[in-house]
Image: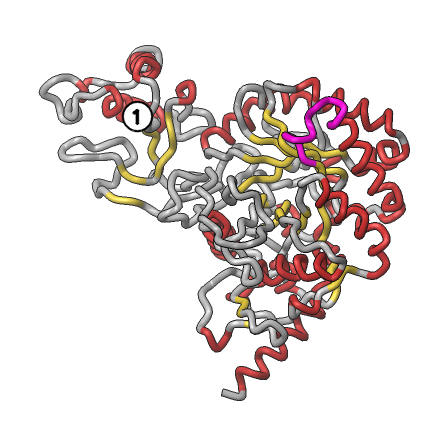
Amino acid sequence: MGVPLLLLLLAFSVARADEGAFIGVNIGTALSSMPSPTQVVALLKSQQIHHIRLYDADPAMLAALSNSNIRVTVSVPNDQILAVGQSNSTAANWITRNVVAHLPAVNITAVAVGSEILTSLPHASPVLFSALRFIHSALVAANLDRQIKVSTPHSSSIILDSFPPSQAFFNRTWEPILSPILKFLQSTDSYFMLNVYPYYDYMQSNGVVPLDYALFRPLPPIKEAVDANTLLHYTNVFDAVVDAAYFAMAYLNVTNLPVVVMESGWPHKGDANEPDATTDNANTYNSNLIRHVLNNTGTPKHPGIPVSTYIYELYDEDERPGAMSERFWGLFNGNGVPAYTLHLTGSGVVLANDTTNETYCIAKDGADEKMLQAALDWACGQGKVDCSVLQQGQSCYDPDTVNSHASYAFNAYYHKMGMTVGSCYFNGVADITTTDPSHDTCKFPGSNGKNGTFPNGTSLAPSTNSSAETSNAHQDYYGTAAAIIQFVGVLLSNILLF
């Protein structure tokens, strides 16, 4: 689902020139009724999610991902960091069990070593660098270091004075650890993993940070935040935080390391004191985030440079502790029902989790005709779809092609099954779309009778360790609020001068 990378006429680039940005999804498992691994993978396929991040390396989930070609980031859980960081052989065994054993059937592309170790598990921070080195050495020994990258996700709260971005620097306490880690990531052609949560920046600003600025909503030029040192204009919190990371790395003499955002999102429900945790705001943020990333917009400091991002998260986690919003970050609930409809018109067939009947199942472009015919025969036979309208002289006979007939049959089955998870797969020759495929007198099930494009919608299961590692992570982002308030406060003061 990545888009082609734009030609960048730059002397130096912080992104690999043959890749475009992608959107991935995080998978948490603190659900009272967690879907089975096969159900999760079926949902990923139906939503055309091609990149995921697991919070561990659950063998059942990895088995379900076999031959799916979904790109997987597996993780060394936080409770294993001390063991891995203190023993090269333990790290080697971890790679053997959790990576090598699943190749090549599972497309593992990265290993995330821990989750926000510096802020959530500081007593393990002294061994974080050695854990990264040991895991990488094990990949080198297995001749996998070129295809599988190693990094560690950080909370954005480790960046101090992050607004304006040009003044940003890492917490001095962590510099002795971060400096060698950054140089390691640079030398291994890896990337800096960063978690970015504009929701918390907005919430902690007590109204100083405009909601529109947090949600990527268009701002008039007079309301854009301007970095006085660089004169770069910032129209959203996300870009400002990512650029703050770039500037903080440059402060430590690391200037060509890409940033991948491993977590970002917005809750769709909250307590009475969380009035902006709404479906509308979650919809707006994630829709705009996806569009922003897939357009390869980049940031003001690095325009056009991809910032691939993983949405937090696939499922609502109803067993997470804390404020109500902690349980409602998901694109779906545990039954695979979408939390809301993402507005992605113009973004193609991506994350089509429409909550209405305005999604359709059609034959995939370029699919093998023999496979399409077999799937068509199944739908009209064992699938018990009424295919009488495809007979000669009937309303959906023309055009008389396998692709056209298969699209009708696939969609009829999809709606017959209530658009449930996995009902639009047909051995990989079907896609979900939000464009009504009805034509002439042929009305597809689910059609409202109008042709055209509807707003495109959106939307795995490691062990319970994933929940422990994300349960308190969101609290770490409050540390950046003061800097944001100060920066935006100056901005608003400047606006009043006009």
Q: Identify the amino acid type marked 1.
A: Ala
Q: Which residues are magenta?
A: 139-149
Question: Is 9 positioned to the left or the right of 404 in the image?
Answer: right
Give the mark count.
Answer: 1
Q: Position of residue 250 (x, y in %)?
A: 70, 59
At 43% from the left edge and 39% from the top edge, which residue is drawn?
350
Q: Secondary structure at mark 1?
A: helix
Extreme residue toward the front, this view? 11
At 33% from the left edge and 12% from the top edge, which residue is drawn?
374
Q: Is residue 143 magenta?
A: yes
Q: Position of residue 418 (x, y in %)?
A: 39, 29
In the foreground, 302 or 223: 302
Question: Label 1, on which residue?
Answer: 412
In the foreground, 234 or 185: 185
Q: Main secondary structure of the magenta part?
A: loop
At 52% from the left edge and 41% from the top edge, which residue is drawn?
19
